[in-house]
Amino acid sequence: MASPSAAKKRKVTESGKKNHIEIVTDVNELLDPLETILSLRNQIKVLRVALGDVVKEKFNEDVLAILSQRFPVDGDKEAQSTIRYLNRKLDELSEEYESCLAYAHAIPPPSSYAQCSIWTEWQKKSTAILCFRPSDKQGLPLCILDNVFREFQRQARAPLPLIGEDVRKAMNAAFDLCYMMPNNFDTEYDRGQVFDKCLDPILPNSSWHEKLHLSAPTELRSGNAGRAYVLDGIVRILREDKVETGTGDDAYMQLSRVYQLYVESVRKKNAPLFDQGVPVILLCVLGPILLICGGFHDGKSTIVEPLVEPCLMFGDRLHNRQEALARQLFALKRALDTLRSRSPPNGGTANPHPAGVPRVYTTYTTEDNAEHSLTFLRPLEKSLPQHLLFIAADSLDPSTHKLVKLVGKGYGVRAHRLLAERQVAPVLYGQSSLEGAPTAYIMEYLSPPTDSQSGWVTLFEFSKSKELVPRYSHLIEAALTRILTMMEEAKVVHGDLRPNNLMLEVNSDKTPVCSGDEQKVKLKVVDFDWAGQSGEVRYPLQRNEEIAWPGDAGTPIVVGHDRSLVENWWFKHFPMI
């Protein structure tokens, strides 16, 4: 049901409940004398049941539909007068009930969202926060959405600088926290006060605000942030404290909902900040455990992600835990300095970005070291964002879309270029490498066919056509054999040469594009994540073990493995007719 406009938004209060209960009493009294009118008895009976549901605060569309029905003006003058008054009361009641219904079905406030029974249901809805709970609710990695998170993660894992005022303050704060946080505290407030005092050298106490109230025109429910760190009028840190681990509800889910509510509160109030993604550091203090997360809105979804491993604020005689905490605190201070330096913090203009695309890659470098601008347009497949494939444009040829693939580990650049030179792989234009983020590989986009143009489909997709497979399997097999021979001669391996990693060019009618006297089909190899020189690359430890791989996990990929893998699946997808 659509939410009422902000102007009509109402909160359910005790006085409001009394109000609609009083109306129900009035309506019931008006119905009594109308029982004698035979034509109204069924409608009165149904209405009385609905009125009982109103009193019991059962909010659903069926009850609203009954309350919205009006009685025909029948009977003598006295009855007609009663019915007119009754209908006016029903107008009043249905309006009250509709507001209550909207409120009951609105996203719960943070304190309720922290309850497992609540968030598990709401995380199934379109308003779900992408915070890894449940595991399928994941957004893009924060390190590719905002450099402040990328730099935080890099700094938190790097050795501390040997000198510097911020380093000294971070180390002192870490030792203080590891001394104080293991102690027992009576309340969350007491623990929070001590936490603030320990952090004061790097996060001045004066900038913390307790119980910051958050509301938004787009939200029917408001809520409070346990603590908020405000710089120049903008919230930079949101925090929830628990006196001990296991006490109360889920602080992480509560904090995620607090951030979602904060995002909505700035949507209209501060458009430039919203266009920047509303980056905020989120802190969970769970007894003696500190969890530092990040929050970002990518234009469509609210994303929350733990930025580092939880830090146990226990001191040890070797000072290892103190130093680990100091690295996180030093990175936190650097992140705040970066956020504070940004323009425009409040007002001015900012460039909006398409939803669901990376924001940290602005240029890429070609093989000959030329630099070109890079503009992301959209995810390749909105239904499969975990693949980290995107459509982009560049300054080299703005009219031609490129494919950008983000890879967190190794990539077979040499193997890709070798096959691309022989026109059996997409052209690899260049790459963008940023410390602390996946490498972006920019390559030719093999676009799908349209009603008027040829295009590319996976061999897996083509193999589903029972009509076309028998006619073209011999041509496809010949093209695949040529590619395998070419790779074996160059001692290059792919490792994952399955039908989903082979692209076939087809016409608009889905028949393969054939060329030359021999009517050769065009195949191209994609996804070179495991590729490289024979014997120098290995199968990953984590892979789909239902597939009959030629080698064990973790062992080298060598010449002959690709051909064996192809032989394993060929007759399953292209059976002999």
Image: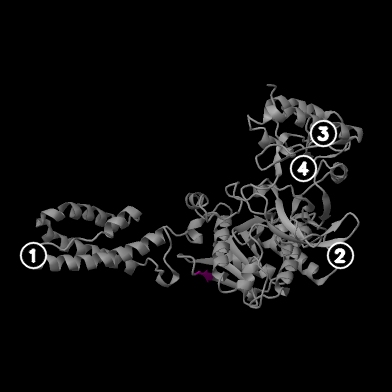
> Residue at label 1?
76
The quarter of the picture where residue 414 lies is top right
Residues shaded magenta? 212-216
Q: Percent position (x, y) of residue 296?
A: 64, 62
> Residue at label 4?
527
Spatial CA distance of label 2 from label 1 is 95 Å
> Residue at label 3?
517
> Residue at label 2?
162
Q: Earlier in the sequence, mark 3 or mark 1?
A: 1
Neighbours of disc 2 within 10 Å: few (<14), some (14-19), many (20+): few
Neighbours of disc 1 within 10 Å: few (<14), some (14-19), many (20+): few
Spatial CA distance of label 3 from label 4 is 30 Å
- At mark 4, the secondary structure is loop
| Residue 81 falls inside the magenta stretch | no
Q: Residue at x 73, y 27 (%)?
A: 570
Q: Earlier in the sequence, mark 3 or mark 4?
A: 3
Judging depth in this view, the residue of 509 and 378 nearest the camera is 509
Neighbours of disc 3 within 10 Å: few (<14), some (14-19), many (20+): few
Please tell me whether mark 3 or mark 1 is closer to you in this view: 3
Q: Residue at x 62, y 77 (%)?
A: 233
- At mark 3, the secondary structure is loop
Spatial CA distance of label 2 from label 3 is 70 Å
Quadrant containing the C terminus in the rendered view:
top right
The reply, left or right, for residue 492 in relation to residue 275 is right
Going by the picture, which residue comes out furthest to the front? 517
Q: What colour scheme was applied to this rendering of the protein? A: one colour
Please name the amino acid that badge 3 sits on.
Asp
The quarter of the picture where residue 362 lies is bottom right
Residues at badges 4 and 2 in contact (C-beta under 8 Å)?
A: no
Residues at badges 2 and 3 in contact (C-beta under 8 Å)?
A: no
